[in-house]
Image: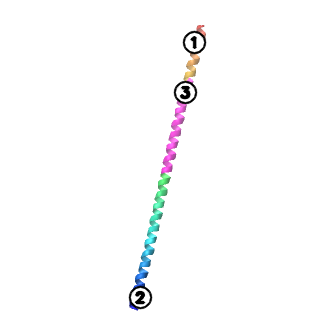
Amino acid sequence: TFEDKKRENFERGNLELEKRRQALLEQQRKEQERLAQLERAEQERKERERQEQERKRQLELEKQLEKQRELERQREEERRKEIERRE
């Protein structure tokens, strides 16, 4: 009957709308996942960069400390030689 066809058409329309709604939700979920992955990758890159800078800073500091120790050794050696000359 006309009412049956009208109801079937309405139900088909609702099914199609639900299908589209689910597809849109899935698309949004995938986009959020993609953006989250990009954000994680960016954070990891920044962390690696920070660690590399820290490593370079530490190496530079160690180099300076070694230079200072070497200067101290030289000064001590000079003082020792000076004392020996005086004796």
Residue of label 2: 5
Asked which secondary structure carries label 3, the reply is: helix
Which amino acid type is shown beneath numbered disc 2?
Answer: Lys
Say which label, 1 or 2, has the lower sequence index. 2
Q: Disc 3 and disc 2: Cα gap in Å?
A: 92 Å
Between tags 3 and 2, which lies in front? 2
Residue 4's disc number: none
Which amino acid type is shown beneath numbered disc 1?
Answer: Glu
Magenta-colored stretch includes residue 39: no
Asked which secondary structure carries label 1, the reply is: helix
Is 7 situated above or below 68?
below
At a point 50% along the width and 49% down the height, the residue shown is 45
Magenta-colored stretch includes residue 47: yes
Q: In which image quadrant can residue 80 be found?
A: top right
Q: Disc 1 and disc 2: Cα gap in Å?
A: 115 Å
Residue 38 point in image, percent of width and height: 48, 56
Q: Main secondary structure of the magenta part?
A: helix
Residue 66 point in image, percent of width and height: 56, 28
- In the rendered image, the quadrant that contains the C terminus is top right
Residue 61 point in image, percent of width and height: 52, 33
Numbered range of the magenta stretch: 43-70
Say which label, 3 or 1, has the lower sequence index. 3
Circles 3, 2 touching at the beta carbon (< 8 Å): no
Between tags 1 and 2, which lies in front? 2
Asked which secondary structure carries label 2, the reply is: helix
Residue of label 3: 67
Say which label, 3 or 2, has the lower sequence index. 2
Residue of label 1: 82
Q: In which image quadrant can residue 12 be found?
A: bottom left
- In the rendered image, the quadrant that contains the N terminus is bottom left
